Each structure stands twice: as C-alpha cells, then as structure tokens.
Image: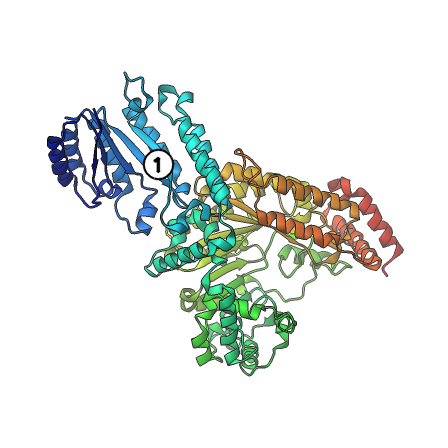
Amino acid sequence: MKQAIIDIQENLLSFSEIEKKLASDFESRDSQEYLINLPLGVLLNSDLKSASQLVKLLRNKPQIQIKTKIPPSQAYLDFFAIGGNEERFWQVLSVFLEGHEQLTWNLDYELDLISIYNFSFNLEKILDLNGRFKRSGFSDHNRVLPICINFVEKTQAPWMLLKEGTEEVLGQLQILKDFLSQRLSSERAHLTGYQSSDVDHVEAIHHQSLNGISLPEKRKLNINTCLALLKKEQEDGKSFLYSFPFLKDFWDYCAQFDPQITEKTLVATKNQLNKVSPTFCLAKWTTTTLHLESGTTHSCHHPPVHKIPTQKLDENFSSLHNTDYKIKQRKMMIQGKRPSECDYCWNIEDLKSNEVSDRIIKSAAPYSLNQFETIVKNPYSEKINPRYIEISFSNKCQFKCSYCSADYSSTWAEELNKFGNYQTMSGASTKEIIKEEDNKYVQTFWKWWPHLKDDIHTLRITGGEPLLSPSTFKVLESLVEEPIPNMSLSINTNLGAPPVLVDKFIDLCREVYEKKSVKTVEVFTSIDAFGPRAEYIRHGLKNEYFWQNLEKLLQSVPQMKVYIMCTFNALSITSFKDLLKKVMEVNLRQRHARRIFPLDIDFAYLRHPEYQTVKVLPSEYQGYLEDIVHYIEENHWLNSGSTEMGFLDHHVIKMKRIQEWMRQPVSDSFLHTQRSRFYQFFSEHDRRRQTNFVQTFPEMKEFWELCQRHHERGLI
C-alpha cells in the first residue's frame, strides 16, 4: 500500500491542534503507512501531556514514520532567537518511542559552521535512546532502531556554509567521521550504533567541502554579511563568542575582512585624521602600556617608556595614562608636529611607496575610531580613559630566561645583586623596581579601576610572572563579582607558579567563563625548546610540571584556548622538532568537538641579545631548520590523517620566515664578536647557575668550541 505523506508546516502548532489535523487525515485516507513531517519548533515548544495524547492516536496506525530536524544546541536556539528548549525535544522523542513500539523517527542533521562543533551531544543522545527503545524480531536494521539520522549540508544562510569556514571546519568533519566509525552497529552489541552509510555520507560532504572551499577573496561578501549579522546580534545584548566559543578562530578570520578595517576604511581614517593634522594619532589617547613595577608608561609599543610623575596621582587617577609628557606629545600632534618618539611611523609615512603606518592602522581600530569626536572636542583632557591596556603589576618572576633581564624578572635582579652584571651587560637593570605591596602606582590603579573598567575593550596582563602577583587574582575576582561582558582579557603566564596558585588561577578562569564575566579569556604561555634544553634556556622551568599544568588548564576550562609563544633562538633549534611533536600530542588528547585546536603555537625569532640569535650559528645548522619546516609541512592538518590534527598555513609561513632570516648573510666581524660574547655569557651563566652547556647540548659541542676560539682571540 502506498505511503501517505502528511506535512505539518506551522512551527507554533500545539500537539492538540496536530492531533485534530491527523485525525481528520486518517479518516480521509485509506492507508496503514504514514510519513509525517513535523517542524522542529513544534517539538521544542510542546508539552508532554499533549504529546502522550497524540501518541494514543498514532497507535491506531502501525507503520508511522516521523521526520524532523535536530536542534544543533541550546546556544544555537537562544542566539538566533529560534526559541524552545533542547531538552524538551529529547523528552518528547522519548514519549513517542515509549508509547508506540513500531514508530520510527528520521532526524535530519543540518551540518553548518556551528552545528559541526555540536554533534557529540546529539549523536550520543541518539545512541542512548536507540539502546533504550530498540526492538526485537526484525531483520531490517531500520526497524530495530527507532531513530535514524540523515546528515544534510545546509544550503541557506551563505555565511554558515561549511565551505565558508576555515581549515578547522574540515578537521571537524574528520572528527565526525571518526566518531561515527567508532560507533558502527557492526562493531557494537545489539546493533545500536550507526551505519557505514552514515560515514560514507559525511565523507561525501567532506570531499565536496574540500573541493569547493572558497578562496579568501571570494569569501568576503559572505563574511561581511556574517559580521553585519553578528554585530547586530551583539547590539541586542548577545555575545557570539560566548554562545559559540569554539568558533573563535572563524571569528578572528572574519575580522580580517571586517568592513571597518578594509583598505577603503584605512584611506577614510587617514583622511579623517589628517583633517585634524597630518600627525594626529588616536593611539596616543586610546592605548597604553603600564609598567607599574617601575612607574613607567608609553602609548603604543613603538615609543620608549617614560616615567609617570606621582604628584597628580592622588587627585587624578587617570594620570597613570594621561601624563604631562603624553599630553605634550598629543599637543604636538594636534599642531601638526611630529613627536620624535614616533619615528617608527614617520619613517614609514616618508616612504615613496605610500605605505600605511601604524598611526592609521591603530587609529582605525573600532575601539579607537569611535572615540574620534570625543578626543577632537577635548584633546588635552587629563581624564581620557584608554580602551586598550597592557599592564604589569610586578617584575616578580621565578624564571631567569637567558635573553631576559632584571627589569622583567626579580630572580634575574637577585642574581645580579649577588654576582654583579655579566660582562656582556645582558640582563642588566635599566629601571628602579618598586615592590608591589609598597607601590603607589599599583594602589592608584585600583582607585582608578571603578572609573576605568567599563571603558576597556582589551586588558592584557603581563609581568614578571602574573600568577605571582596578587593583583592578577584581584582582577579575576573583581570580574567574577562585577562582570565586564564586552571586555577581552588576556593573561601571560609561564605556568611554573606553585600548585596552589596555578589551581587558583584555573578555578577563577573557569568561573569567569561560566559567569560570562568577559567576552573572552586567552592564556599565553612560553617555551622555546623541549626537555632539558628548554629548562636551560628558561632557567627555573620544570619541563614536566609545565606540560602538566598546561593540560590541566585545557582540561579544566574546556572553552579556553592556550597559545604558546616561542622565542626562537640559537638554543631552540636542536630540540624544536620535539617541541612540535609534543604540541601535536597535547592537541590530540585535549581536542573535543567544540575545540579542535586547543593549543596553538606562535614563532617569533629572537633579535636581542644578538649573540643568542640563530644568526650566530654555522650554516650547517640550517639543516635543523629545513627538518623543522619539513616536519610542519608533512604534518599540516590536510596531510595528518584522521588520528591527529596537525599544523596550519601560518605555522609554515612563520617558520619559513625564520629560515629566510637565518640565511641572510652577516659580516665576519659580526660573527666573531657575537660568538665571542656567546661563549663569554654562557660560561658565566654555567658558573652562576650550576648548569653545563655541553652536557645539555652535546650536539652543539663543536659550536661551543668554535665560540671559545673566537673568545680567546679577543673582541674586535
């Protein structure tokens, strides 16, 4: 007998209304087999009592199939104002399956940029229900399992298409295939798993997305549409990243094409600034770096720091940022004069190629540009609140990294007080350091905080080691008590603090996320090599303890992503491949459906002190870098297969950049001087710190002896 199809199209119908419609259809049709298409909204908003009543009617028809969509997640429903309760959906399914033993339910799972990160909960739920309500006495698998799933690729909402995503999306499809493959009915008791055809279907979508993925220049329209939608939603009081933290990489990718920072916008910003004066820069007002341990500040990172006078701090807390010196530089800019401390930008703007300087780029940032009118109306105000703040409360640090200094590490300072400066002058202090508990600048910051916090777009805490500073925990505790939902928080840490402090930090990060106290929290940590070699470079580091704490952080705060900042130097090169292997191992262990790359790694080459850079190494060491580049390319995520997630394009690009920098020729006098200093510094390093270079780096013994010969010849 032919199957009768009944379409229910109204999302807001109650089950009582649907019961009346079905009763009428059953009377008018002579069929024992029905397919009923039910909208998702009906199931999300229904009550269980009326669901039970409807099931009684359906029992009169032995062969009933119901077809509907599956809700991606509660966050999805809430953010896009679809409404309804995800848990109610599963409760209604249970009522139907329990009340009608021959009913089957076909679920369409639309795969898009958001749902692809949410599948594990839904698919485990289906396995659970199929296990509870499986039938016996059928040879047909589809009759044994009451719920069947069909994967379909979304075709509406262009910005949400899988092919519009970044590389991680295809990785998510691979994880979905693995998930299904590990739960096949053929490999499970009682046939309650998935079918090989499900895996094949996802494989087809994966292949189609891989071949059809848009080129960046073709993606701009959809991404800008996405950004416009998301910004509108944020204006309605919603936070995209809090609803979908697993899409942060996609959000960051979209930001590259943000209409507010396109080439046209940069030109418009330049014209807008130049109407005030050709030297006007909003960053002088809207950004600040505060080194409270030394009482110094600068606006962006290009100018040198200057001292913050204490005279005005009691009457005007914002004098931490609005110093007389800065106001003088601002006045020069308004008058069209060029402050000499900003020569980084002036050099770029004087190039004939008409390059865009950071004066324009930093001013074009939305948190700066939206302050334009306010600043122009009152340019010399002493009470301007910055929007971007980078702050260190203390130089207290338990590490003595070989390329660091007493300005940023208290243990470096203790060593210099005991032994004096190194002959190379490495690590020498250039600032007077004030203890945090006696620091007027820190005290003033906390007086300023209630008047400042709601204006902050981004707060980044540096050090020293922030976890050794009580003020870091004070910031986190303050955010738990009084959230700032539009602020982004970044914290640097070496993850080497005592366990009680690491655990306290992790607990507070988790609480900040759970309470949605800020827009995002990012943790940046550092390691430059692997094993004993890493411990030698970053003296005080315990390699195993570092990785233990890093994984504890990732495990405890599943929404968080952690970034490793590598300062690639001459001592990194021989064990760096092992470090990359470790990163891949951690990503494999800590990944989940909503966080495919929990740990990212960034490479920046050391420039100072010059004798510790890769420039001092003999040409044969380039083989190490070639091997590292080859390893990254070989383990690119597209080549790494289903068992591990590899590296991305930017990793390849940055390591090749280091490779090219290392290959640039240098003079014989440079090599002689810097290799001599290398031997001079690390010989004294070994004596003071009870370390042994050759034992730690036996593969560099010949280079050590080469540097020794240079040193014995004397400096040029």
Residue toward you, 600 or 712? 600
- Quarter assignment of residue 205: top left
Q: Residue sitting at 50 percent across and 58 percent down?
A: 256
Residue toward you, 155 or 360? 155
Q: Is residue 371 left or right of residue 434?
A: left
Q: Residue sitting at 87 percent across and 50 percent down?
A: 709
Q: Quadrant of the C terminus?
A: bottom right
The correct choice, above or below, for 631 with respect to 354 in the image is above
Q: Position of residue 313 (x, y in %)?
A: 50, 74
Question: Which residue type does callout 1 highlight?
Answer: Asn
* Rendering colour mode: rainbow
Read off the residue under disc 1: 122
The correct choice, above or below, for 342 with respect to 533 in the image is below
Q: Position of residue 365 (x, y in %)?
A: 49, 66
Q: Position of residue 334 (x, y in %)?
A: 53, 81
User: In the current view of this chain or complex, which residue is farthest to the front?
Assistant: 2
Q: Residue sitting at 54 percent across and 70 percent down?
A: 360
User: In the current view of this chain or complex, which residue is farthest to the bottom?
Assistant: 335
